[in-house]
Image (tube, grey):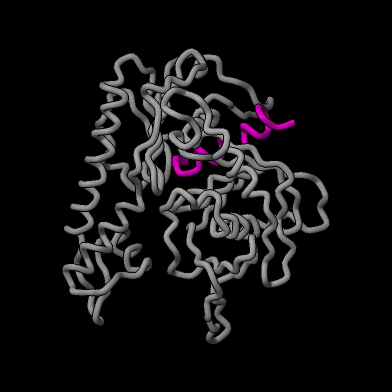
Amino acid sequence: MSSASDTSVLAVGIDDGYAVTKLALPDGQLFAIPSRGRLGAVAVTSVNGKASGVSGYRTGGDTVSVGGSEGDSTASDDYPFSSLNRAIVQHALLAAGLSGRSLEVVSGLPVARFYRADGCRRDALISRKRDSLQQPVEPSDGRAPASISRHDVIPEALAAWYDHVIVEDEAGAHLDDERLRTPLAIVDIGGRTTDFVLVADEKLWHESSGSLNCGLLDLRREIASAIASAFELEQLSENAVDEALDNGRVRLFGNERDVSAIVRNARRQLVGRIEQETRRRLGRGAELERVLFVGGGSVVLAEALHDWFSNQVIAPHAAFANARGMLKYQRYVGGS
């Protein structure tokens, strides 16, 4: 793909979520890695030539190890401005083949961290996020890092609106007039937050927009806690939580254990919280042309979302809607 000798500046959409970091590239390629890493070096030895899957980075005076099956919690207000965030983003960029490239990128903040309730921007937080991701990150294995020469920050769920209204086809990119005119609500179910935006007449209506601190990381924590309690464990690994979510089963003490009831109960609790807040903000959605569900949570919870609104739809490639919208914003709206 790209190489260190390529000196052109590349546009990238970076949805650096609390659970998964996703990239959108101009050639249509999409990349995703778990937002999983930890401060400090991790001692892992390769056996029989198998790669350890862990990479080290230096940034902001910290050593950060990215990859592997376990990591420090990302569910904090400071994560978007942290060394951990920068290292995970760099890991994703290198995984996408962007070593040595100069990038102009757009990332996001949750709606409630981008705007105050009165609609004013939180400029200090926005600047902090923009500056953080432009700090140098050095891979410990000698690879040339991807460097960010320009970084714009937009509200996360609003990025999905840009993805929806900016249409790319053989003739180029254009605003879809019908989509631009019609009132639309976006429900973005992410890792730590569920974001809401309502756009009508090309205006963001703040009374119905905002963030709920609830997402897929809450689901994972509830499943891990319930399984640990049921089997008298101190803790459960991230890999075991993945297995429980995917298959409703987990291997403990050398045997397969059915944990499907625990997973169903945790899903039901999460969905209940999100549905209650969604209905509080949007009512029945009667005057909306569409309620668009995006984010990784909309994929994981799709079966439980199907009948909330008669005019709802889950976006195509919903997990990447924000990353795609961020890329479109950089290329057609905010880029210079």
Identify which residue is drawn at 70% across, 32% down. Answer: 335
Q: Is residue 262 above or below residue 273?
A: below
Residue closest to the eye, 71 or 29:
71
Q: Is residue 56 above or below residue 130?
A: below
Q: Position of residue 59 (x, y in %)?
A: 64, 62
Q: Is residue 326 magenta?
A: yes
Residue closest to the eye, 56 or 314:
56
Q: Position of residue 83 (x, y in %)?
A: 57, 58
Q: Position of residue 1 (x, y in %)?
A: 71, 55
Identify which residue is drawn at 45% across, 51% down. Answer: 18
Q: Which quadrant holds the C terminus?
A: top right
Quarter of the view holding residue 248:
bottom left
Identify which residue is drawn at 53% across, 86% down. Answer: 47
Quarter of the view holding residue 284:
top left
Tell me the magenta residue range.
Answer: 316-336
Q: Is residue 152 magenta?
A: no
Q: Position of residue 258 (x, y in %)?
A: 19, 66
Secondary structure character of the magenta stretch overall: helix
